Image (cartoon, rainbow, N blue to C red):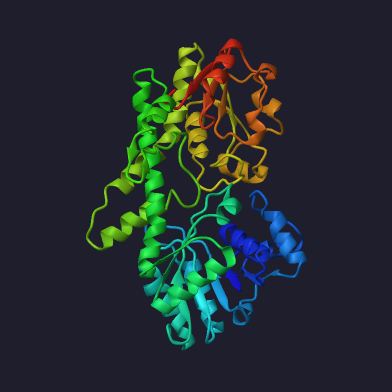
Amino acid sequence: MAIVGLGYVGSCFAAMLADRGCHVTGVDNDDRLVDELEAGHCRYQEEGLAELLFAGMAAGRLRVTTDYAAVREADVVLIAVGTPVRADGSLVDEQLSGACAEVSRYLRDGHLVMVKSTVPPGATRNLVLPLLSRSGLTVGEHFGLAFTPERFAEGTALRELRRLPIVVGGIDDASTAAAAEFWAHTFQVEVFPLASPESAEIVKLADNWWIDLNIALANELAKFCALYGVDVLDVIKAANTVPKGAGKVNILLPSVGVGGSCLVKDPWMVWRSARERGLEILTAPIGREVNAGMPEYTAQLIIDELVRLGKRPDASTVAVLGLAFKNDTGDLRATPVEGAVTALKKAGVQVRVYDPLVDPVQAEELVDIKPAATLREAVLDADCVALMTLHREFADIDFAELPVATSCLVLDGRAYFPKERITALRRLGYVYRGIGR
């Protein structure tokens, strides 16, 4: 098979399919990415990914190239290129259109093409299909076409690919059946066949719409709990015991904000798609507004607490631990930490940053601060240690050994320290503050 697009998603599927015995050709127009992989370097920090990729390449089951002609030799073509959106929620389709146009040049009788890139409802039918049809071949007669959304989470991708159900929606019944058979055979997981590509396209959007809106609820609940001096994590734990539907109430956790390549754009894709058909969706933009405001809210928590401690913000130092948008990744895409750092700098705070998983050059480009080389350098005489991620390296920090300033604030942006840890911090002379805690 051929996988078009060796970004994070495409690389994960290439590795897994090669591991399952498929002969995979990964195609990408990024010469540097292909050269890196051939030289044994994987730029994506996903547990187990590099090992699987290079094991597949060493075994001859996986190769990478910039030549789309490799598509012709495959039986199945998986398109997994980036699909960003503009500020108005409309799809930036250059990568997808370009990939489909290239695939059309090598499309042949018997091909099954599956789209994995997140798209607005109707894009498989109205954008992808016309471009593939430039080949002169007819869908349903010469080739199959289906949409199959990517739904795993960064940081746990390979584990989830081994167990998550896979959704498929074909342009016709034969395409749906072929796509379902492919995934059932290769991944041996439950497959959900749907009646159309539009159904499958909406499944992906619905998942991320729900997650973003649920986190927005958690963030506003945290703000609400703070008004009464109540620990939001206690409230969430108790609230989530109520049976509802097929499960229980499931409020997620508050944090410094939402980031990554999907959650920040997919709700806008929903909103834009609905508006184009005359429906005004309300919850998607509201959730986005709440979550987009959390970095500044978090920065203000730090500033307010510094003032309460008798420290001038413009004479204080804040050590930000973790720049990535998620624990145990080095991914800076749409990271909410950037907004928090910007707000702190605007208030005159001296900010240091440290993230052992993030490329230092990318970090400096993002926040215009040269990252500290070590944890100790970052926290030296700091008035606040702001844990914006809980990488494994941060989980075991010995706060008693940190060379911080007197009455140092620990801002918990995503660590969710248990009460015992908070009590221990206070015994050491720290002041603790979390989101809604």
Residue at the spot 59% in from the left edge and 67% down from the top edge: 186
Residue 134 appears at what percent x and percent y? Answer: 46, 84
Question: Horizontally, is 66 left or right of 284 in the view?
Answer: right
Q: How far from the left and from the top, in percent, is residue 142?
A: 47, 87
**Closer to the camera, 393 or 31?**
393
Of the 4 image quadrants, the one containing the C terminus is top left
Tell how many labels: 0
The spot of residue 13 in percent (x, y) is 59, 62
Q: Is residue 269 left or right of residue 54?
A: left
- The residue at the point 38 percent across, 22 percent down is 226
State the residue in front, 246 or 180: 246
In the rendered image, the residue lying farthest to the bottom is 136
Asked whether the viewer can see residue 114, the reply is no
Residue projecting furthest to the left: 278
Quick check: can you spot residue 126? yes
List x then y, in percent, for residue 33: 67, 62
Task: Using the image, determine if residue 379 lies above or below residue 8.
Answer: above
